[in-house]
Amino acid sequence: MVVLTGLITVIWGFICSLIPSVSAHNFLYHTHANTVVFNLLVGCIVGFAYVLFELPNSYMKRRLGIRSGKTPRGIRGIPFLVLDQVDSLFGCVLVVSFFYPMTIWFYLAYVTIGGTTHIVTNVLLYAVKLKKNV
């Protein structure tokens, strides 16, 4: 995840350099130059944060006897369904907040919008049978 996110961030930086309107909306470039080294560094840190912030949820699920990649059925599964979609976002947005100052409300909105997008995408993929479980 660390290497792949680093490489994808470098590619995204290249795309941003070709399309100024996209670059203007990238929070990272409001305070730092769009360079390969910066993008690689931020991408690797975001990838590490992604993995690191997945661990507590996974640990808790294993202790409750929930298998990897699974969510409990019924009402008990709802918190895990949501947490599975947003846990890594807390870490990734935290990394972004080190490079682009944000209020706690902006941080929480960022995580909420990202998590909602993730859940809706998963439900749609499940509905068209491209994914086995939500």
Image (tube, rainbow, N blue to C red):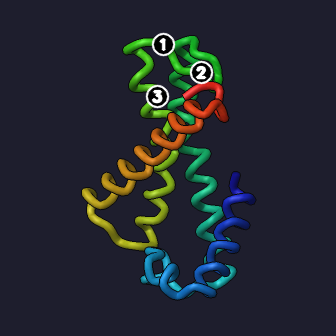
| Residue linked to disc 3 | 81
Say whether disc 1 or disc 3 marks the residue closer to the N-terminus: 1
Q: Check whether the beta carbons of the residues at disc 3 and disc 2 lie within 8 A of each other.
A: no
Q: Is residue 81 left or right of residue 133?
A: left
Residue 45 occupies quadrant: bottom right
Residue under the image location 57 percent in, 11 percent down: 65
Tell me the number on the disc at residue 73.
Answer: 1
* Vertical side of 21 occupied by 94: above or below: above
Separation (CA) of disc 2 from disc 1: 9 Å
Occupied quadrant, residue 116: top left
Q: Secondary structure at mark 3?
A: helix
Quadrant hosting residue 79: top left
The local secondary structure at tag 2 comes to loop
Residue at the image position 63 percent from the left and 55 percent from the top = 47
- Dot 1, how many residues are within 10 Å of its Cα: few (below 14), some (14-19), or many (20+)? few
On-image quarter of the C terminus: top right
- CA–CA distance between discs 3 and 2? 9 Å
Instruction: Identify which amino acid the numbered label 1 is placed on.
Output: Arg
The residue at the point 51 percent across, 82 percent down is 23
The structure residue drawn at horizontal position 67% and vertical position 81%, both measured from the top left corner, is: 14
Name the disc covering residue 70, or none. 2
